[in-house]
Image (spheres, rainbow, N blue to C red):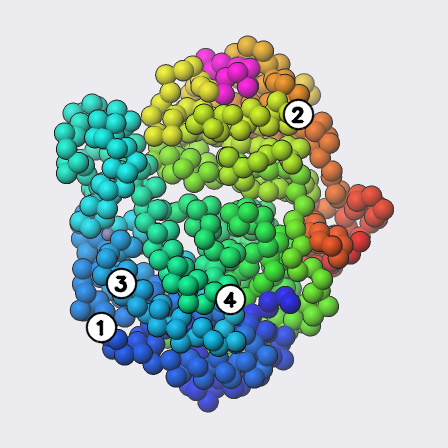
Amino acid sequence: MFYYGVDYYPEHWPEERWEVDANLMELAGINVARLAEFAWVKLEPKEGYYDFSWLDKAIDILSKHGIKTVLGTPTASPPMWLVKKYPQILPRDKDGNMMGPGGRRHYCYNSPEYRELSERIVTAMAEHYKDNPNVIGWQIDNELGCHESNRCYCDNCLLKFRDWLKKKYGTIENLNNSWGTIFWSQTYTDWDEVIIPRRTVGAHNPSLLLDFLRFVSDSTIEYQNLQVEILRRICPDKFITHNFMGLFGGLDYYKLAETLDFVSWDNYPKFRGKPNPARIALSHDVMRGVNRNRPFWVMEEQSGAAGWEIFGSHPLPGEIRLWAYQSIAHGADGVVYFRWRTCRFGTEEYWHGILDHDGIPRRRYEEVKKMGEELKTLTEIKDSIYKAETAIIYSYDIRWAFEIQPNNPDFSYMDQLQKYYTGLFNQHVLVDIVHPLADLSKYKLVIAPSLYLMTQEIKENLERYVKSGGTLVVTLRSGVKDWNNVVTDKTLPGELAELLGIEIEEYLSMFPDETYHIKGVGPERFNFKAICESLKSKSAEVLAFYEDGPFAGKPAVTINKFGGGEAIYVGADVDLNYIESLLFWLITRSRVNVIAMGSRDVEVTVRENSNGTFIFLLNHSDKSETIRLLIPGMIEEITLEPKDVKIIKR
Ligand code: GLA
Ligand code: ZN
């Protein structure tokens, strides 16, 4: 069964309304609701005194309308009584100031007291609901790390950080050598001198900063897994998920996903600015990627104008349906709308749901309902697998290293990732997002944007892939540092020099108003900005030269034969036009199947299972658009109405 749901907060509405809501949900084809993830104070109004009666009743009413429940553990919002009794659970900022209650997520993930209090409420809920057949699964907490809440600088985190470092480095000498603490006399003579990066004069050691971000991530994951362990033990037959945040970078999502049955995430295409289909698509693909390419859920899908103090534009007619189908097109097997009805009070008064404040079903409800009817005929798609022949490598450690040292104010790792992704997206090529150590053998083309940090294992993984026939694109600022965020003493691109067949003679950071050009074999010139590198070919051939600027005449882009494959290096922050033309050439050269040609506003994806191959066509534009499918046995032109979706089975 496909799960089609809503995020529902019965605690926000009078009990008499619950039946009305459940009935409207049923009529719209809703079959699942997520409940209770912020309801701690109503579940445990006094310490150790639990009241599940209201939640039992809500679950029961929903179930009578054919709606199952996913229960959120309520630990994202510690109640006021808890904070009063255990103020030591509150997090501290960089200045050592306590962050008080009033919003949400006001807890230190490493607090032993908070961990115990969380374990108690989770255990009580698990015991109470373990035999309730209407509760099908759990969501742990809510958006772990949101609001940067996991970057806590309290004394307790300081002690835990030292333990974490002891485990990693063994001896203080090893830590000193790995971080280069001789610089500015930062050498530690004992573990109890090691600091946490609170506000300082100047800036901290980049190796310490990177390990701190890893520690923050590990602490968050450890906190999640305490809950996972309890739920697995007490409720072995219910699934466990967590709602991730797409392109959020505050923790290592590959690791967070490891203990879960599947990943779910919160998708708000029209939150800040206009929706960008390629960005939404990348977010979905990152989520599927951290979920090891299995089907995922969207646990919060936008259904109304979003915002807290300021609200954005409502989804236009067709957009709710389009975004929900886009989720499915990228591998979702469950779509849950945030939220059923817009709340009348609290911080999120203007974060609109399917129903408005007055609870009357209107246009947005009708659209949800229309899609609910359609989904009933689409059950075959469930469990199908996304079919990509290309991959982009994405690493949280590298992202953090660039957060610490962006290299140039106009350079961004995520922007690199997005640009190369968009280059493929615009040509209707499907992409998987993968870890640097993933098995790459099934891909015809792999892109590794700015592999800033390097290990022996990553180097070997890339070499193995290219040697056995793969095509690899590596971009600027790769191979610069070791995994401890220390610069290599090798000539750049360091460990990747042999694979790429080049040396970097010089690299340069440009001013914000500087743009220069590169030129390949054709007449066209292409812009680049921010950072450029002057390449020297050892065994590589040159694909493009710098045309002007400080490196005029020097190689900018190269290709090197390595074993049975080829490794391309792009030494500048080139614009999307160049990326598209380079990728167009490489797609053909590495025989990636192009599944469609025509309108760029029509997104095309493919999912496959034993029931067949499903081709999704999504028109993101306000006009009708035509696309030509190039799938063998399916060479045909298809026209889609504005914002319309078609699913074709083969
Ligand atoms: C997130 C959270 C929700 C809600 C929405 C809107 O995705 O998970 O609880 O706060 O944003 O702000
Ligand atoms: Zn802390």
Q: Which residue is mark 4?
A: 237
In the rendered structure, does residue 504 fall within the stretch colored magenta?
yes
| Label number found at residue 116 | 3
**Left or right placement of residue 401 versus residue 135 in this view:** left
Taking depth in this image into account, of 626 and 138 the one nearest to the observer is 138
* Viewer-nearest of discs 3 and 2: 3
The span shown in magenta is 496-506
Q: Which residue is mark 2?
A: 469
Q: Which residue is mark 1?
A: 81
Q: Residue furthest top?
A: 538
**Left or right placement of residue 282 versus residue 494 in this view:** right
* Viewer-nearest of discs 4 and 1: 4
Query: Mark 2 is on which residue type?
Result: Gly
Picture coordinates of residue 91 (x, y %)?
24, 55
* Viewer-nearest of discs 2 and 4: 4
Give the number of callouts: 4
Mark positioned earlier in the residue sequence (3 or 4): 3
Label 3 element class: helix
Picture coordinates of residue 452 (x, y %)?
43, 29
